[in-house]
Image: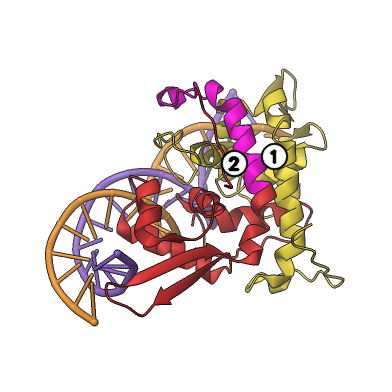
Chain colours: A red, B yellow, C purple, D orange
Amino acid sequence: MTRQRHLSYDCAPGCSVEAALSLIDGKWKGVILFHLLDGPMRFNEIRRKLAKVTQRMLTTQLRELEADGLVIRTVFAQVPPRVDYALSDRGRSLAPALLALKQWGDAHMHLFAGADACSLTAANDTPAP
Amino acid sequence: MTRQRHLSYDCAPGCSVEAALSLIDGKWKGVILFHLLDGPMRFNEIRRKLAKVTQRMLTTQLRELEADGLVIRTVFAQVPPRVDYALSDRGRSLAPALLALKQWGDAHMHLFAGADACSLTAANDTPAP
DNA sequence: CCGTATCCAAAACGATACTG
DNA sequence: CAGTATCGTTTTGGATACGG
């Protein structure tokens, strides 16, 4: 998270925008949430998707998302351990916003000054199978 | 900004979500953008809307938004000085995402653990349409 | 496999004072 | 009015290393 969780802006219009943003900021939360739209995933599954995330970060981000009630963490009592992360209803309700963000990103990425690494040539995304 | 500007995630699906998010993170950018949807504003006008922002912060956030091509800064050569901030086309194209975020915020704010400051009495949530 | 703990570097942010 | 400059604190996030 960029700031202390659950800031108290005075409740002017725009407050809710930041409140929402405050839940999905943090370096990885947006992507995590986005990937979870596909369905539940295990810890290392997510980790693979996010390539450069560290365990520590992934754990913290996931825990915060859990604390905010956006994802649900399910621990299976078995060996080796298995933990699933899934979107809660509340988390899933963020989908429209997430998708809007993604579409904007897709549409404007080619304009990003530093985003030359991203060549979205045949960029085809089919999120929900 | 929470992170270095224009991170280079590997371009998996989800990349564009974070790319978009990276432009509107920072403690105030979301709200600034949101308020600018109403039309151009002067520095102190924005400042008043954001009540608790400091000059320094407002300046930096505004400058970053400008650098990212989301807002346009117009300086009028007069005394006393006057500077207008307006959304660029690109900034305005963020409107759908901003609105989606705001709606989600409005719908879910009453559930925020620490958001007691915000009393939206007639809280009605209809998560998934 | 799925974490925690510790240490550390870099940022984001705030307060305050000063300026054209 | 609309900033800059400087300083100090808090928050983030990365690198290990260790544990159930």
Query: Start and end of the magenta stretch?
Result: A97-121
| Residue lying at the far right of the rendered structure | B122
Q: Secondary structure at mark 2?
A: helix
Q: Residue at x 63, y 50 (%)?
A: B53
Q: Which mark is residue B33?
A: 1
Q: Report the side of B13 relative to B115 (left or right).
A: left
Total numbered labels: 2
Crowd band around label 1 with a 10 angstrom C-alpha radius: few (<14), some (14–19), many (20+): many
Q: Is residue D17 above or below residue B99?
A: below
Q: Secondary structure at mark 1?
A: helix
Q: Which mark is residue B84?
A: none
Q: Residue at x 75, y 48 (%)?
A: B49
Q: Chain letter of disc 1?
A: B
Q: Could you tell which of marks 1 and 2 lies nearer the N-terminus?
A: 2
| Residue lying at the far top of the rendered structure | B77
Q: Reply yes or no: does residue A116 show up in magenta.
A: yes
Alpha-carbon span between mark 1 and mark 2: 8 Å
1 and 2 marks in contact (CB < 8 Å): yes
Q: Report the side of D16 relative to A69 (left or right).
A: left
Q: Amino acid at mark 1?
A: Leu
Q: Amino acid at mark 2?
A: Ile
Magenta-drawn stretch, dominant element (helix, strand or loop): helix
Along the line of sight, the residue nearer the viewer: B30 or B108? B108
Q: Residue at x 39, y 35 (%)?
A: B10
Along the line of sight, the residue nearer the viewer: A77 or D6? A77
Q: Reply yes or no: does residue A17 show up in magenta.
A: no
| Residue receiving disc 2 | B24
Snapshot quadrant of residue D2: top right
Q: Is residue B14 above or below residue A66?
A: above
